[in-house]
Amino acid sequence: MGTFLATLLLFGLAFAGLTLGLLFGRDPIRGSCGGLRKLGLEGDCSCESPCPRRRRELERRAARGEESEP
């Protein structure tokens, strides 16, 4: 029971910290742009609307005449 309460307290503190960050004007947590690509792995980007960084990359590739997906 002690482990459960310690874990609950830890998650509560983490949640409170994230909430305080939002209240003081910090940006909310969001996913990374590129995800697996940052690790050097190619992945499928089948998003309906890619993030701005990915959109710029796709536009650069199209301008150079490369394939849009490897």
Image: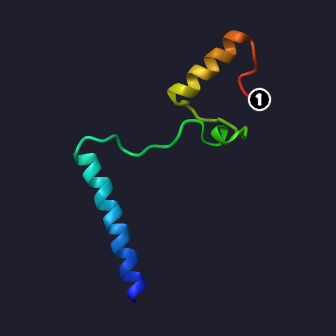
Return the residue at label 1.
70
| Above or below, 28 relative to 65 | below
Residue at image coords 22%, 45%: 24
| Above or below, 17 relative to 33 | below
* Image location (x, y in percent) of residue 36: 65, 42
Q: How many marks?
A: 1
Quarter-of-image position of residue 49: top right
- Quadrant (top left/top right/bottom left/bottom right) for the C terminus: top right
Q: Is residue 33 left or right of residue 42?
A: left
Between 45 and 35, the one lying in front of the other is 35
Quarter-of-image position of residue 45: top right
Residue at image coords 35%, 62%: 14
Residue at image coords 37%, 70%: 10
Q: Is residue 27 left or right of residue 37?
A: left
Q: Amino acid at mark 1?
A: Pro
Q: Is residue 30 left or right of residue 67?
A: left
* Image location (x, y in percent) of residue 67: 76, 21
* Image location (x, y in percent) of residue 65: 74, 12
Between 44 and 39, the one lying in front of the other is 39
Residue at image coords 41%, 82%: 4
- Quadrant (top left/top right/bottom left/bottom right) for the N terminus: bottom left
